[in-house]
Image (tube, helix red, strand yellow):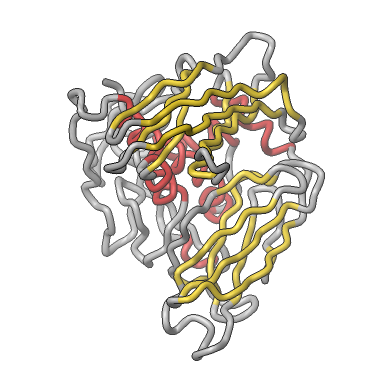
Amino acid sequence: MSLITNGAVPMPKNPTSLSRPGAAAAPVRAARVERYGGAAVGTGAPGGARGDAYRRAVEDRLGASASAQELSRKAQFVDYESMRAMFEAWNTRMWRGAGTLHAALPHPALHTPVWPVGGHGLDMGGGYYGARKGCEPLHVQADPLDGTVLAANHTGSAVRGATVAAQLYDLGGRPIGEPSRHTADLPAGAVTAAFAVPFARALPATHLLRLRLTGADGRLLSVNDYWRYRTPTDMRSLNGLPYVRLSVAVRPAGDGAVTAAVANTGGAPAAMVRLALAASPGGPALPAPADDNCLWLLPGESRDVTLLRWPAAGGGAGEMPTVVAQAYNSLPAEG
C-alpha cells in the first residue's frame, strides 16, 4: 500500500510561528526519500541524500521562496497534505492488513524538518494538524486517485443515520455543480464507502473539494478540505488568490482554554488559516494546541476553534490572551 499520495514528500516539518520570525530562519534540512514524484517513501535519516527534495516539493507546488519565512509559510501545505495522506491511507485498510505508521522524531530537541509532528519549540503547524485530521475519531476523507469518499468510525459505537456530503468550489469560492449526499449507518471500528467525486476532465485544474460528515441530528462530526490539482505546479494558482480580511473574536472556554471565532470577511477563499496564541498583541506566539487548524474558509464563512491556554498565556488569571489568525492570502488578524 502506498502511504503518500499526490507526490508529497513524507512527514516534513518547518517552523510554524506566526509572530516569531526568528524561528523561521532555522536551517532547513530535507527529508531523505527513496524517490520524488508519484508516491514517495521516506527513510527518515536526517542527514540523508537528496538534501533539496523537501524544498523542491514546496517550490514545485507554490514557487520559489525569497526568504526562510516565505518557505515556512508555503511549506504548511506540503506538511499538512503529507501527514494527512499517511493516516488516511491507513484508514482505507483499517483492521485489514494496515501496517504501523510511526514518527521517528515526533518531537525533536533540535530543529529538523524530517519526520517530526511537533516542532522543537513546541509549535504545531501543517504536519501536526494534518495528522490530527487523518486520525479524527469520526472522519470523512477522499481517495486522491479515484475520488472515492469514505467515512471512518474509529469509536466503539455505531453512528446511525450519518450523512456524508461533498461539494466542489472554484478558487473564487463559487460552487461547481450540485452537492453529493449519502446517508448510511457507520459501524464501530469500520470504514464505509459513500460515493465518488472523480477529477473530471471538465473541472478546473485547481479546485477545492469540501467533505462534511453530520449526524442524524444535524451536528457536524467532521469537515475535510482538499485542494485538488492535476499537476503540482497547478497549485501555484493559489498565489494569485486575492488578499482577504480575517476577523477574530475570542471568548473563554473553561479549563484553561479559549475559543476563537475566526471569519473570512473577504470575497475569496481564505487558504490555510492558522491560529495561534500570543501573550500580548504583536507579541511572540505561544505553544497552544487547537482542536482544529490549517483551515480553508469560504467567503463569509466562520469557524469556532478552541485553543488550550497554558497558565502563562495572557500574563495572569482572568486575562484573555491574544489569538492571532493568518491565512496564506491574508495579513495577521488579532482578537
**Residue pictured at 40% horizontal, 41% vertical:** 138
**Residue pictured at 42% horizontal, 30% vertical:** 151
- Which of these two is toward me, 13 or 55? 13
The quadrant of the image that shows the C terminus is bottom right
Residue found farthest to the right: 267
**Residue pictured at 52% horizontal, 71% vertical:** 285
Q: Is residue 219 above or below residue 255?
A: above
Q: Quadrant of residue 192?
A: top left
Q: Is residue 49 visible?
A: yes
Q: Is residue 209 left or right of residue 109?
A: right
- Which of these two is toward me, 201 or 38? 201
Q: Is residue 183 left or right of residue 50?
A: right
Percent coordinates x, y for residue 301 in the rendering: 71, 48
Percent coordinates x, y for residue 146 in the rendering: 47, 14
Q: Is residue 185 left or right of residue 164?
A: left
Q: Is residue 7 visible?
A: no
Q: Is residue 33 above or below residue 119?
A: above
Q: Quadrant of residue 241?
A: top right
- Which of these two is toward me, 96 or 220? 220
Percent coordinates x, y for residue 222 in the rendering: 49, 42
The quadrant of the image that shows the N terminus is top left
**Residue pictured at 74% horizontal, 37% vertical:** 240
